[in-house]
Amino acid sequence: MTVMGLDVIISCMTRICITPFVQGTGGMASFRLKFEQGLTSRGIDVTYDLDDKSDAILVIAGTRFIPDLIRARRRGIRVVQRLDGINWVQRVRWAGLRYSIRAEYGNFMLSLIRKRFADRVVYQSQFIRHWWQDWYGIAKAPAAVIINGVDLDIYTPDGKDNRPSDVHRMLLLEGSLAGGLNAGMFHGAAVAEKLAEKYPMEVVVAGTVDETTRRNLQSKVPVKFLGTVPREEIPELARSSHMMYCAEVNPPCPNSVIESLACGLPVIGFDSGSLKELVSDDAGCIVPYGANPWKLETPDISTLAESAGQVLEKQSQFRAAARKRAEAAFGLDRMVDSYLKVLLED
């Protein structure tokens, strides 16, 4: 569909309903804010009430308002479901009773909406699409893959930074590394320790980390825990680091990786989940996991540390390539236009 054709449709539409209304610093809230920004710039109205008149509904993952969703479909409103990954860690290791119940309930609701109520499905990466199809079968609804986007004018290499010159800073940027989700943080610290045999290193962790995990992290490299960082501070934090380590095992489509690349921060990690889809070879280094990530086994620390050394030694080259990768694939306008085609096209 041409841009002109899309403009014609947009000029005739009035409103898109986004549900649920999520707030905070996590991926769903970040997406909602960015998507709304794109809609508003195009003169499109937004509502969060499924009973309001709207031209299409975007379900960000799942919603508990199933009766409202049913009524909207009966009114002929298209329902598009945006799917992230499947909750799986609780099936491999103990993550606490509350987390496990919520995770399995979430899987049930997501799969129910996908199977019974979605007119279109959007997967955030090819990895997510294959994962859902493998575990729950191919959905009857037409499907598309739309990679997350970022405002390249906000997440940019240009701007204030305090990147140290006497030590190399590895950034771990996640919504949560607490409880059962903490495995990748220990792997990241181990990579930093290996790198420290040749380079002065420090680790900065931005995200929720529980006290038990902090105590258990016995690292020979200095580790700074920043807690949850306000969204507006992330660009400077990324610019102030030398590399970003993706600490999520089997990451579905991490916003933190896309945001880091946009800020010119090279990304390192193990080849699991969608990471290889996002990070090109010249924008960081992604190496084979070397074990079974689905069992949370220990990855090949030495191989990643050896490759990551090149990122530290060739900072200018990798930083330029990281930004170039973001400009080529992760612009916000590109993402919003792709969603609008799914929401509005016949």
Image (cartoon, rainbow, N blue to C red):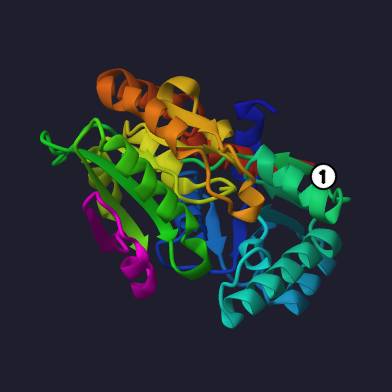
Horizontal arrangement in the rendering, residue 62 relative to residue 174 (left or right): right
Give how far across and how far down residue 196 sits, in percent. 25, 38
Q: Secondary structure at mark 1?
A: loop
From the image, which quarter does the N terminus lie in? Answer: top right
Q: Residues within 10 Å of mark 1 (few under 14, many from 20)?
A: few
> What's the amino acid at mark 1?
Pro
**Residue at 50% from the left image edge and 47% from the top image edge:** 254
Q: Any magenta on residue 322?
A: no
**Residue at 24% from the left image edge and 30% from the top image edge:** 198
Give how far across and how far down residue 281 sits, in percent. 48, 22
**Residue at 10% from the left image edge and 35% from the top image edge:** 166
Q: For this rendering, which residue is in front, 289 or 12? A: 289
Give how far across and how far down residue 261 sits, in percent. 39, 34
Quadrant hosting residue 4: top right
Q: For this rendering, which residue is in front, 283 or 41? A: 283
Q: Is residue 35 above or below residue 283?
A: below
> Disc 1 marks which residue?
142
* Magenta stretch bounds: 209-231
Q: Is residue 319 above or below residue 56?
A: above
Q: For this rendering, which residue is in front, 36 or 3? A: 36
From the image, which quarter does the C terminus lie in? Answer: top right
